[in-house]
Amino acid sequence: MPALAQRFLGRSGLQISELVLGTMSFGNQTDEPTAHTILDEFAAAGGTFIDTADTYQFGGSEEIIGRWLTRQDRDRFVIGTKAYGEMSAGAPVNGAGRKHLIRAVDASLRRLGTDYIDLFQIHLFDDATPMQETLSTLDVLVRNGKVRFVGASNYAGWQLQKSIDLARHHGWEPFVALQPLYNLLRRDAEYELLPICRNEGLGVLCWSPLEGGWLSGRYTREMTTPPAGSRYATQPEAWQQQATEATWSVVDALQSIADEVGRSPAQVALRWLLQTPGVTAPIIGARTVDQLRDNLQTADWSLSEDQVAQLTKISERPAPYPYDLLGLPQFRRRP
């Protein structure tokens, strides 16, 4: 098994493994013994960054990780979690206000059984809370030692840039990372989010890098309905929305290149992300040990420039306004 390389998270001094272990399935599709085996194998392969959130199984994912951490050298691992919603089923969402964030951090620390969170992220932009309140609270959490670094997930471009500018203006702790949806089938982050992250020095941690299995090789053009046991078996409308010619063209190209390099489609899709400028690490959400082992084979090899270009070209979609105009050569003033 190749060892995972370490990368710096944006311009920070925090080093993380080139693949991040996502744990949304822990306590649901993945039981605790299996989850601990996955964590063991991830760590043995050189994995250091484990990502969770307080809403995953209402804190159950954090608890599973916390019990595993009791047998580990805590300082070897980078633990990232996220906050936004309340921690009981049916409770109202509490957003990113000061009261909720302080309570959320304390609750996550208890469940994880640790004294500090390496990367604490706002799970979703909160348009009901002033940005200054959110950002100043994050700054306090870093200053009091409960949190080492802060980041965001699921922000629009203007929300991310304004947050960066406000933190800079006030001297508050800046975001060091963004966690956006980004993969070969969902490339909208390229319009605003990825350029902001490259310009401002934020690391990029891609969630759903295999687009719910569509880039894993499980689904093929010959299928007219979702396979039994898949997440789409009970979501026929979602299947129909995704099972388009545009999707199948990407899936076909992915399989073709996978055959060329002797790899699985999932490994090729992850490798494309790892070779995308500005991307720090994809978040692999392996539900089983076999899925993890396949994903870990993404390390220690590369796609050729031509293969990267093929995948990039086949997965391009028509740009919406104003990006369709901004990208035209006659409107570019500098190369």
Image (spheres, grey):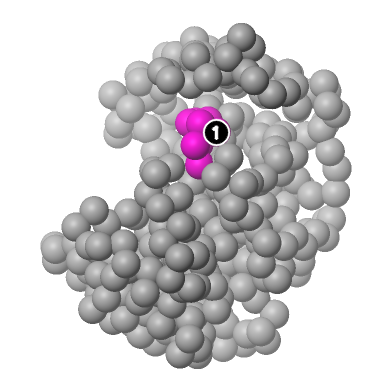
Residue closest to the eye, 209 or 217: 209
SS class, disc 1: helix
Q: Quadrant of residue 137?
A: bottom left
Judge whether 217 appears above or below 196 on screen: above
User: Is 198 inside the magenta-drawn segment?
Assistant: no
Q: Is residue 255 visible?
A: no
Residue 295 or residue 93, whichever sits in front: 93
Q: Which residue is mark 1?
A: 190
Q: In the drawing, does residue 331 fall left or right of residue 16?
A: left
Q: Position of residue 193 (x, y in %)?
A: 50, 42
Q: Amino acid at mark 1?
A: Glu
Residue at (75%, 27%) from the top-left corner?
308
Q: Residue at x 59, y 52 (%)?
A: 200
Where residue 290 appears, as percent x and y from the top left, is: 64, 51
| Residue numbers of the magenta segment | 186-193
- The picture quadrant where one finds residue 241 is top left
